């Protein structure tokens, strides 16, 4: 065959030439997408070691882990038990510090797994129900997913686009879990680094959980005027059937609400909940402003109390923070229990494939104490109908009035005054004294215990007379319980970009003294009212107080002399003096998200894949402190640790020493308190602020000034520092007594000193601390950073440094 030629060029010459038009087009498309996305930080889709050297170890060098072992032994594997006291190592080679680090780390990854699994369940359910194209409408914001964006570098705009972030969290959780196997990691410092990483993933899982339900289920969207919700046991109408839901995943509850509306039952059946499911059921279909048939009973501490009251006609549980004894406790009062989530099945039979009428009859007759129903359509119908049918049956049997007056007297008279209950009570309630007066007919002392009791039942576990002490306390407190009502603002969702722009400057400069985040469980070491007192104190001083979960509920259960709750007295916006109920436990991601937005929106920092710089900015510039006053669960440890990696300190209640770990700096070690000026890289000294990332306090009075101090930041301007010092000093004098010993360390110039005490404090500085009036050596820091390596930073930071 002859060649086809064109001049000196032959077609045959092209036989080995590869045409790559698609690759060229693909590269151009990728370049265009990169241009649209903007700068990318150094750590998108991080792994176990990504943050370790550049950030985590720097944090842990300043905030040294303090271990608090529960015992000297390790029983983790079949080599043990091993004695780890006196610097001994176990048979596997691990020492006490490593073992303790592993124990804390286990709690953190368990909490992270809870929120990630919650997010996966909701995401899959909502994708199946509504499809992938549901837009992430979260309110008037462009920065929709700060935690996801910082972690993955992506900014999803629809439900379907969230999947890569979900998969990343799950993949890294598997890697993290592998490190606790015997014979893997043994260094305590690396377990702490991994715990910080897990905490960052926890806030991704929480963010996914909340944004998908906000977008698909029409929850409030950054709404400062979210409606007020009446709450408390006293809000339940005993004349109506009561369907009680407990847990943290509202997906199944929405089907109950839909069934009630479709069948015009909203005024015939009471639907109330405990824990975060209760908060989220009041957020559903926010645009319609939920009718008053949805009730919030209260926090986890009320679970056993509401069951023992006999009020619920049906109990439905989903997942997380649900007591393990609900089925046997409910059985005593003929209350059927339905498990609606595969994470809690209680050994009950599954009735997904059984006829609805047959299931209702089986439960109504008492043939089974409860069942599992994972089919939400069936769950909605069965739970509501069953409550209607159980109500008259239980009324006729008289089980809604337990115990009787005669039974109460019999129990009280059995008390041997041995004091075992007092020793077992985690908050040392004087139950023996109350019982003594009750024997004489005075039940007022028992009544006083009701508000402080956290419903843990430890007193009953040690009572040799087998007295149901919790029931005794609640029976004596019937009048209080009947009138137990408060108000809580429905969870409003994330803080909007506009709110960040409005408050960002004030927070960075310090003229808004700080953000106080009251979160966590109700395992209080003194009383539930402590969170109310703390919130009120900071609100009156124009701090921004944000809350979630049980903390948000308990803040709203107390009233002032005018009969108003905090939610009625203070605005719901992210403004100075605002009380912001963000939502349920998974809404905690929006609290870290608010601090991250200050760095991204106000500070102009790249958020995509850029955790270290964002966290560095927050630590040094954004005055914020968390309070988990009743922290009890593994989730609380992961939430707090996620705050810590972003430079947000947290104060926990006294019981939280059982987490086995704190992060506390040596405020006297000046080598730990140096940062770099981002303008020129010059190393600068700073005061010890904040001086801890994770610690505990014994009383709410001790915690209050501690939190005010923790809001001081190196970047405060003179007015901001003066304001923060004023609040810290006043609170210290009010609750501790006298002036703080180290107040002088936070003075950089004469303008920092609170004006009302300036002359007196100046004199103390000169006479007691040998200060000469040479304020220039204490100049205000601009752009402080723990780490400073411009070459490792994203392009916009390089530009900012050059401009500075």
Image (cartoon, helix red, strand yellow):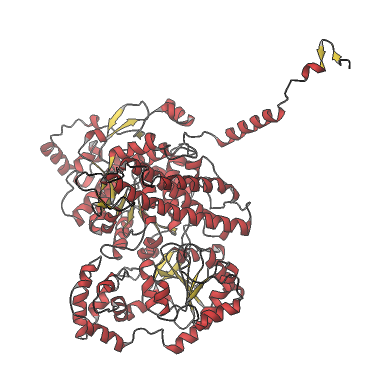
Q: Is 72 on the left or on the right of 28, as rendered?
A: left
Nearer the observer, 736 or 303? 303
Toward the front, the furthest residue is 79
Residue at 49% over, 86% down? 392
Q: Is 467 on the left or on the right of 220, as rendered?
A: left
Nearer the observer, 355 or 655? 355
Q: Position of residue 386 (x, y in %)?
A: 53, 79
Residue 574 visible in rendering: no
Toward the left, the furthest residue is 767
How many discs appear? 0
Residue at 85% over, 14% down? 5
Q: Quadrant of the N terminus?
A: top right
Q: Is 405 on the left or on the right of 670, as rendered?
A: right
Q: Position of residue 741 (x, y in %)?
A: 16, 45
Q: Position of residue 214 (x, y in %)?
A: 53, 57
Q: Position of residue 489 (x, y in %)?
A: 44, 63
Residue 88 visible in rendering: yes
- Figure quadrant of residue 191: top left
Nearer the observer, 504 or 342? 342
Toward the right, the furthest residue is 1
Residue at 43% over, 43% down? 598
Residue at 38% over, 62% down? 550
Residue 543 in the image: above or below residue 443: above
Q: Quadrant of the C terminus?
A: top left
């Amino acid at each position: 065959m002859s060649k086809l030629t064109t001049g000196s060029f032959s077609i045959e010459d092209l036989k080995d030439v590869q045409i790559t038009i698609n690759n060229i087009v693909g590269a151009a498309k990728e370049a265009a997408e990169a241009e649209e996305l903007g700068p990318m930080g150094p750590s998108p889709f991080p792994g176990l070691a990504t943050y370790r050297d550049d950030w985590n170890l720097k944090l842990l060098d300043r905030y040294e882990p303090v271990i608090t072992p529960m015992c000297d032994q390790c029983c983790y594997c079949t080599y043990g038990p091993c004695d780890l006291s006196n610097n001994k190592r176990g048979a596997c080679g691990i020492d006490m510090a490593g073992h303790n680090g592993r124990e804390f780390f286990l709690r953190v990854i368990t909490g992270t797994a809870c929120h990630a699994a919650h997010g996966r369940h909701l995401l899959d359910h909502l994708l199946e129900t509504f499809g992938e194209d549901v837009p992430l409408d979260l309110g008037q914001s462009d920065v929709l997913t700060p935690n996801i964006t910082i972690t993955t570098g992506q900014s999803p705009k629809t439900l379907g686009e969230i999947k890569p972030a979900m998969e990343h969290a799950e993949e890294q959780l598997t890697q993290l879990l592998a490190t606790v196997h015997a014979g893997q990691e043994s260094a305590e410092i690396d377990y702490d680094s991994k715990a910080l990483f897990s905490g960052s993933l926890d806030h991704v899982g929480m963010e996914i959980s909340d944004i998908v339900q906000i977008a698909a289920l029409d929850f409030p969207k950054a709404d400062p005027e979210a409606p007020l919700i009446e709450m408390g046991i006293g809000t339940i109408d005993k004349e109506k059937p009561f369907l009680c839901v407990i847990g943290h995943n509202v997906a199944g509850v929405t089907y109950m609400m839909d069934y009630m509306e479709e069948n015009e039952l909203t005024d015939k059946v009471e639907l109330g909940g405990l824990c975060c499911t209760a908060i989220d059921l009041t957020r559903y279909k926010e645009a319609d402003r939920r009718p008053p048939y949805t009730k919030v009973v209260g926090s986890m501490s009320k679970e056993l109390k509401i069951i023992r009251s006999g009020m619920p006609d049906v109990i439905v549980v989903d997942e997380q923070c649900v007591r393990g004894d609900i089925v046997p406790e409910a059985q005593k009062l003929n209350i059927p229990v339905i498990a609606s989530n595969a994470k809690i099945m209680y050994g009950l039979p599954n009735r997904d494939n059984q006829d609805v009428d047959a299931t209702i009859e089986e439960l109504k007759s008492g043939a089974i104490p409860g069942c599992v129903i994972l089919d939400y359509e069936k769950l909605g119908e069965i739970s509501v109908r069953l409550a209607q049918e159980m109500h008259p049956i239980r009324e006729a049997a008289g089980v809604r009035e337990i115990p009787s007056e005669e039974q109460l007297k019999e129990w009280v008279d059995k008390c041997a005054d041995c004091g075992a209950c007092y020793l077992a009570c985690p908050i040392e309630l004087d139950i023996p004294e109350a019982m003594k007066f009750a024997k004489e007919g005075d039940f007022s002392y028992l009544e006083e215990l009701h508000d402080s009791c956290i419903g843990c039942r430890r007193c009953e576990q040690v009572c040799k007379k087998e007295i149901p002490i919790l029931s005794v306390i609640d029976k004596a407190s019937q009048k209080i319980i009947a009138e137990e009502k408060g108000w809580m603002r429905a969870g409003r969702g994330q803080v909007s970009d506009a709110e960040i722009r409005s408050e960002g400057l004030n927070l960075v400069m310090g003229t808004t003294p700080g953000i106080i985040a009251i979160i966590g469980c109700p395992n209080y070491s003194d009383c539930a009212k402590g969170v109310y007192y703390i919130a009120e104190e900071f609100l009156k001083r124009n701090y921004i107080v944000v809350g979630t979960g049980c903390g948000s509920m308990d803040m709203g259960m107390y009233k002032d002399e005018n009969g108003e709750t905090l939610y009625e007295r203070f605005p719901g916006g992210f403004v100075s003096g605002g009380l912001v109920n963000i939502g349920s436990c998974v809404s905690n991601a929006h609290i870290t998200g608010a601090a991250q937005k200050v760095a991204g929106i106000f500070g102009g920092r790249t958020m995509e894949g850029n955790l270290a710089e964002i966290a560095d900015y927050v630590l040094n510039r954004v005055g914020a402190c968390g309070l988990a006053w009743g922290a009890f669960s593994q989730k609380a440890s992961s939430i707090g640790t996620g705050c810590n990696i972003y430079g947000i300190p947290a104060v926990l209640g006294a019981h939280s020493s059982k987490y086995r770990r704190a992060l506390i700096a040596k405020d006297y070690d000046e080598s730990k308190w140096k940062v770099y000026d981002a303008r020129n890289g010059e190393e600068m000294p700073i005061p010890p602020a904040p001086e801890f990332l994770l610690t505990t306090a014994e009383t709410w009075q001790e915690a209050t000034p501690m939190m005010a101090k923790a809001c001081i930041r190196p970047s405060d301007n003179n007015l901001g520092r003066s304001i923060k010092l004023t609040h810290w000093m006043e609170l210290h004098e009010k609750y501790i007594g006298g002036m703080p010993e180290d107040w002088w360390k936070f003075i950089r110039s004469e303008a920092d000193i609170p004006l009302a005490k300036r002359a007196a404090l100046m004199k103390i500085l000169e006479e007691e601390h040998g200060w000469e009036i040479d304020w220039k050596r204490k100049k205000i820091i601009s752009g402080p950073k723990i780490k400073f390596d411009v070459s490792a930073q994203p392009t916009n930071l390089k530009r900012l440094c050059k401009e500075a």
